[in-house]
Amino acid sequence: MGIGYNVGGKVALVTGAGSVDTFGRVNIVINNAGIFEPPWSSFRNPPGISPQSRDPVDATVGSYHIFNVNTIGPIRLAQMAVAYWLQNRDTEGNLLWVSSMGGYVHSIQTPFYFASKAAILSVVKSLQGLKELVGIRNSVICPGPTRTPLFDQEFCRDRLPVNDLALSTENLADAMMKLLTEEQYGNGNILEIMMTGSRDHPQVHQKEVQLEVLYPTASPMGAGTKAMEEELNFMRMVAQQGMRSTCAPEGKH
């Protein structure tokens, strides 16, 4: 059974966490929330300056709704899911994120959208050791243009005209099922999917994106370094005791 809810606020996230009490266990979490840089939460319309902005202006730093929905909410949900699976080792954990090709391509029209999706990719790659460490699968799918109601909105309708090639939601669901079930995935994999070809001969193109090619050739996290030693120690602690063991109460270190 699937359970959907709004990740944009604390109350909604708490409601989602309560699903465990209702249904007994959670095996799959799909982080699918996302909005496409609406005018009211956009780089072009700063809060307190543009009348279109709905983002708060009365905070020291402030926040943007698009990051709350696309980035912060999904990360918080993932935290809760991983903590739950680490406390319930007999329950198979499967975390699937929905990001975007916008996580590694760029556009001056929607920098907030692309930045919010890039952050998700970084989290997924940072968690890529969970499968081997504790058996929790963790992958992300990065679709190209997809026909959904998101592009029916007036402010972004021209970004996906009716005659342009685009994925269907069925195309996306098939690829997501691969990430959830096939053995070669689940270890921080990034799967790109997009519609290519022509209107007469459309083809679904898939490939695994190797962000590792961007890693520096010399790294402070290289083998034999103190940083890598601490990384391995942390991983062992999580495997043995779960995430909560890494957070000592204040004054008890």
Image (cartoon, rainbow, N blue to C red):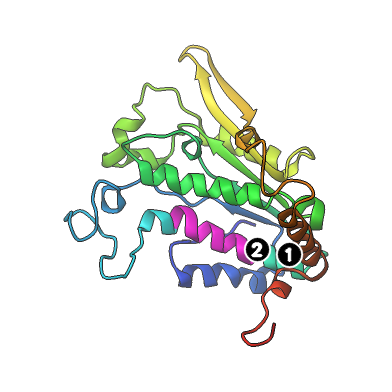
What type of secondary structure mainly makes up the magenta span?
A: helix
**Is there a contact, CB below 8 Å, between mark 2 and mark 1?**
yes
94 left or right of 163 in image: right
* Kind of residue indicated by mark 2: Ala
36 left or right of 16 in image: left
- For the magenta stretch, what is the residue range? 69-81
* Kind of residue indicated by mark 1: Trp
Q: Is residue 75 magenta?
A: yes
Kindly tell me whether residue 1 is visible in this rendering: yes
x and y percentages locating residue 204 in the rendered image? 58, 23
Which dot marks residue 64?
none
Residue at 26% x, 53% y is 40
Image quadrant for the C terminus?
A: bottom right
Q: Note whether 15 is above or below 6 in the view shown.
A: below
Where disc 1 sits, the SS reads helix
Which dot marks residue 81?
2
156 left or right of 27 in image: left
Mark 1, other Cα within 10 Å: few <14 / some 14–19 / many ≥20? many
Q: CA distance from mark 2 to mark 1?
A: 6 Å
Residue at 66% x, 70% y is 20
Mark 2, other Cα within 10 Å: few <14 / some 14–19 / many ≥20? many
Where disc 2 sits, the SS reads helix
Which dot marks residue 85?
1
x and y percentages locating residue 143 in the rendered image? 53, 35
Residue at 61% x, 56% y is 2
Kindly tell me whether residue 96 is visible in this rendering: no
